Image (cartoon, rainbow, N blue to C red):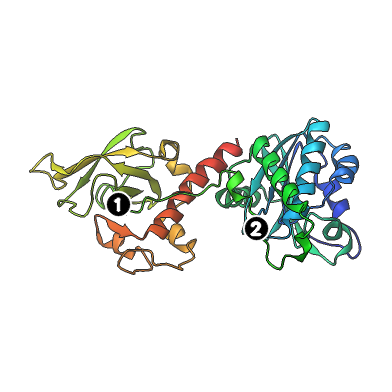
Amino acid sequence: MRILNNIGSRHFDELKQLVAGSDELHIVSPFLMESFDIFFDEIIANSEIKRIVLVTKLKDNDPDLLRKANSLHSFLFNCLTNSIAFRVHEDSKLHGKIYIAHKNGVPIRGIITSANFTDNGLNQNHEWGVLVEDQEALKKVIADIGKVSSHALTREELQGIIKNIDSYAKNEEVHKVPKFDLEVGHLFKKKTVELKPDVRYFIKPVGSSDRPFATTRKLNSDFEKMHFSRRPTPVRIGDILICNGVGTTKLLGYFEVISEPYIWDSTSQWSWELEVKNLCPEYSESWNTFNNTIASIVASYDHVHPVTNVGGSTLGALQFGRGRIQLTKEFAKHVIELMEGSVKAKKENK
């Protein structure tokens, strides 16, 4: 690790060294330079960069949107002119600034800093950061970014955003308006999970203490059967079961209930059964490669709302053999987005 600053050097020059020998650059910054021309002329043109991933903020009613139109237009123009492949993602809560260089799909070095990707941030302001060369740590950073940022915006979505901002900016009264009324969120698909108001969400362990869920086992990617020791009275058709494996405590996926519960074997300890449909088969196929455990999903939750529908803040009852726990919609959404984000991040890191 090496400490960087804008006192004895410049972040702009550090970016030149960062991309040396790499073929892909990730830029994560809430604020952007309005013109990317110098960046492309002095850094990208003299490198082997073939792809740029940009994560930035496009928050509705934010005055920064007026500058973002120029930034996005310049970025798109320079990528197309220089035959650079690109992806743009949005994170309305973004505050961190991160720059990561890749080689053959593997992060090789990165800068985590206070410096925005602006002329002042990279050259003038008093900024500090650190150079990181720990590949595993950088992979974790990239995975985290993937969990909270939007899906890649299409070229049409980006052009629509630019057009909408430009149209608003033509209003000669724009600078006299005390409160911004400019929205672009409806112009791109946000990576959020929309929960149905009448659906209930449960977390359900699969396996038992004497027969833990083996790391080599996978739940069916299409339809699966779930078993209970007693009739799962609260669970209805259309409800969602978020499953975790007994033993590892890792999440196995989430499933929609498609049948009423019925007795499949009255002599079995798990005599009740119901059928479910896998809603994220890609996660279930690789569940053991993700680090989403019962402890981690609770630890990563903001706890503005309770975890369970009875007001609990933990899932500790699972340790005592509870067959299911009903979750709040807010926590269920958090968990589902973690799983979806894990799948997305894995695809992008291939």
In the rendered image, residue 237, in percent from the top left (x then y), is placed at 24, 44
SS label for mark 1: strand
Q: Residue furthest front?
A: 172
Name the amino acid type tagged 1: Lys
Residue 94: which numbered mark, if any? 2
Left or right of 160 on screen, residue 239: left
Q: Residue furthest left?
A: 267
Name the amino acid type tagged 2: Leu
Say which residue appears at 8% left-offset and 43% top-offset.
Answer: 266
Left or right of 172 on screen, residue 283: left
In the rendered image, residue 58, in percent from the top left (x then y), is placed at 66, 53
Say which residue appears at 82% left-offset and 37% top-offset.
Answer: 78
Q: Is residue 302 above or below residue 334?
A: below
Q: Residue furthest top?
A: 83
User: Which numbered disc flags the more N-terminal residue, 1 or 2?
Assistant: 2
Mark 1: few/some/many CA within 10 Å (<14, 14-19, 20+): many
- Count of numbered circles in the view: 2
Mark 2: few/some/many CA within 10 Å (<14, 14-19, 20+): some
Left or right of 20 on screen, residue 336: left
SS label for mark 2: loop
Say which residue appears at 32% left-offset and 48% top-offset.
Answer: 240
Q: Which residue is mark 1?
A: 204
The answer to whether residue 111 is visible is no
Q: Splitting the image into 4 quarters, where does residue 40 fall?
A: top right
In the rendered image, residue 84, in percent from the top left (x then y), is placed at 77, 33
Alpha-carbon span between mark 1 and mark 2? 33 Å
Tell me the quadrant of the picture where the C terminus can be found.
top right
